[in-house]
Image (spheres, rainbow, N blue to C red):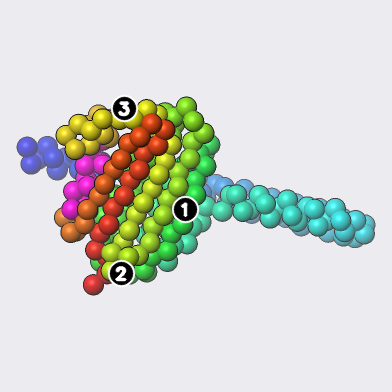
Amino acid sequence: MRKKTYLKILELQTEQSAKHLDEVRSIHKEMRGYKHDFHHHLQSLKTQIEAGDYDRALAYIDELDRQLTHVDTLLKTGNVALDAILSGKIAKAKEQGITITIKANVADELTISDVSLSIIVGNLLDNAIEACLQSSEKPFINLYIGMKAKMLYFHMMNSASEKKVKQGGLFGSNKNGLHGFGLRRAMSIIEDNGGWCKFNSEDGAFTSEFLVPAIQ
């Protein structure tokens, strides 16, 4: 049984690493696209300014500003590990047409390991994205991460389908293992670090919340 559990954990970590790599590649591809287009934008602005068409140039700048506001996936929370996992998940959500709003500000040094933090936050966001894709409503994810004294606080609400019933402490899903082995791992890590987590399912929405010690 221990060997089976160990192999399952290795399989999960390999799968998560592959997913994270794909998400980072997606961000890199998007940034390369903007770098490639930057020269063309400068040439267009230069031509408009040289022609004295200042109103058109200003309108062009305003449009670029609006586009950059909507595609900025490089989140800065104050913690490098959290920046990486959130940026990847933001890119993944946007590719699926999900509206995602994040407010995050945490300490740069946390006692919880980077690996543990990535597993917890990554799995919760993966489950949120999965739920959004099953929802008939406009898909959304609203996420807040911050500090409460020496504790790391996480609260997320996402669109979902109908209300789900708890089975064995977790909510059922299309994944095997009641929302997947990964979510069980996330809950286990939170509890092992002296924290608690809570989940709530309603028609059209799902809420995830946890609080865990993170500063000595």
Which mark identifies residue 174?
A: 3
The image quarter in which residue 193 lies: bottom left
The x and y percentages for residue 96 are: 50, 36
Q: In this orientation, which residue lies closer to the viewer: 172 or 94?
A: 172
Residue found 14% across the figure and 43% down from its top: 6
Is residue 36 found inside the magenta-colored segment of the image? no
Q: Earlier in the sequence, mark 3 or mark 1?
A: 1
Neighbour tally class for label 3: few under 14, some 14-19, many 20 plus, Cα within 10 Å = few
Query: Tag 2, which secondary structure?
Result: loop
* Residue at 39%, 52% in the rendered image: 85
Say whether residue 180 is left or right of residue 105: left
Residue 120: x, y in percent? 29, 50
Secondary-structure class at tag 1 = strand
Q: Which mark is residue 149?
A: 2
Name the N-terminal-most of marks 3 and 2: 2
**Given contact means CB atoms under 8 Å apart, are the residues at marks 3 and 2 in contact?**
no
- Is residue 185 highlighted in magenta? yes
> Which residue appears farthest toward the right when viewing the image?
51
Q: Secondary structure at mark 3?
A: loop
The image shows residue 57 at horizontal and vertical percentages of 83, 56
Front-most of 4 and 131? 131
Q: Nearer the viewer, residue 173 or 2?
A: 173
- Circle 1 crowding by C-alpha within 10 Å: few under 14, some 14–19, many from 20: some
Residue wearing tag 1: 102
For the question of whether residue 106 can be seen, the reply is yes
Which quadrant would residue 160 be assigned to in this image? top left
Residue extent of the magenta highlight:
180-191
Q: Considering depth in this image, is 56 or 43 the residue closer to the camera?
A: 56
> In whole angstroms, how far apart are the C-alphas of marks 3 and 2?
37 Å
